[in-house]
Image (cartoon, helix red, strand yellow):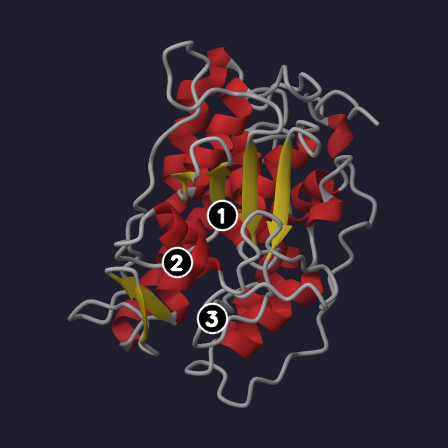
Amino acid sequence: MGTLVDGEWHTDTREMTDEEGEFQRQETTFRDHVRDDPDARFRPEPGRYHLYISRACPWAHGAALVRRLLGLEDAITMDVVDPIREDDGWEFAPGKEGCTEDSIHGADYLREVYVAADPEYTGRVTVPVLWDREEGTIVNNESIDIMRTLADVFPEVGNGVDLYPAGLREEIDAVVDEIYDPVNNGVYRAGFADSQDVHERAVRELFDALDRLDRRLADRRYLVGDRLTLADLRLFPTLVRFDEVYHTHFKCNVRRIEEYEHLWPYLRDVYGTPGVAETVNMRHVKHHYYRSHGGINPKRLVPVGPDPDFEAPHDRERLAGEPPAPLAE
């Protein structure tokens, strides 16, 4: 773990916790938006924007999912960092399977991209990052902002799939907010807690929320409305990592997702949506968590299992709801 201070890299192996041992996620800094407005600084133009992600990171996974399901691969280019994050932070390792070079700057580390955007930048170096070639800067490095931006102003640039329907946005945003702290961030609150009480509180809140979601999905195919939306794509990256990583590595072991009556087939249903499975690189996921967090896993051994069968049949089609329109080839 490290951070930039006035554009200079400083290594810090401690996770960020408060005085009570509660994990504190630092707020992201670049929060501009791409807008379909002739007077906007950032406009939705094909070929103008570039996405930096890690296949291991659930936050970056959400952005990659939206890009793929909207068919934006040609309109928004993308680079993938090394899943193993050492003291120097996210690194470009084009020689590794599933990784790329930095095709924009030729940088060795993602922190160089941040400094290119702001030579005096102070803060964490995180993924995803949405880069603007024209302005030569980072537009946004907040995952849900990027997901919303792509779904809001880029559908017509891609295949026209609507993941953020106007009539459902209020409910989608409410569900996204509802799952963020106890689920998406909850696994980190449990795993990086510095006291037993804090860990147990985070685990209770996590499984209370998962239980609620399981009940919600008993009679509906998707979280909001009758179609796959951003709400599902926000939840999916956490669920797909859960049994392989969070259950063991972050000690969220009250139960596995496979043990849930409705969440487990729901996870397989979303995984089976055309385009989704190819965004999942479980080798990157497992090697990142088990080999990057030496304070949690000192020997950095990577478990062999449990290898859930995400392609197993499910019966979710019986419920009302439709997946996105077929993706453009």
The single residue placed furthest to the bottom in the displayed view is 299
The residue closer to the viewer here, 313 or 97, is: 97
Q: Quadrant of the N terminus?
A: bottom left
Marks 2 and 3, Cα distance to the nearest angstrom? 22 Å
Q: Element type at marker 3?
A: loop
Q: Which residue is mark 1?
A: 128
Kind of residue at disc 3:
Phe
Asked where in the image residue 34 lies, by quadrant, the reply is top left
Q: Position of residue 153 (x, y in %)?
A: 52, 19
The residue closer to the viewer here, 64 or 212, is: 64
Q: Element type at marker 1?
A: loop
Marks 2 and 1, Cα distance to the nearest angstrom? 10 Å
Is disc 2 in contact with disc 1, using a CB cutoff of under 8 Å?
no
Marks 3 and 1, Cα distance to the nearest angstrom? 22 Å
Q: Position of residue 259 (x, y in %)?
A: 64, 58
Q: Position of residue 152 (x, y in %)?
A: 50, 20
Q: Which residue is mark 2?
A: 125
Residue drawn at x 53%, y 43% is: 235
The answer to whether 86 appears left or right of 103 in the picture is: left
Asked if residue 244 shows in the view, the reply is: no
Question: In the displayed structure, would residue 285 be above or below residue 218?
Answer: below
Task: Tell me which label, 3 or 1, sits earlier in the chain.
Answer: 1
Question: In the displayed structure, would residue 284 be above or below residue 172?
Answer: below
Density class for disc 2 (Cα within 10 Å; few <14, some 14-19, many ≥20) is: many
Kind of residue at disc 2:
Val
Density class for disc 3 (Cα within 10 Å; few <14, some 14-19, many ≥20) is: many
Task: Tell me which label, 2 or 3, sits earlier in the chain.
Answer: 2
Residue drawn at x 48%, y 40% is: 131
Say how many tags the image has: 3
Residue drawn at x 49%, y 47% is: 128
Q: On residue 250, which mark appears?
A: 3
Instruction: Indicate which label's residue lies in the foreground, 2 or 3.
Output: 2
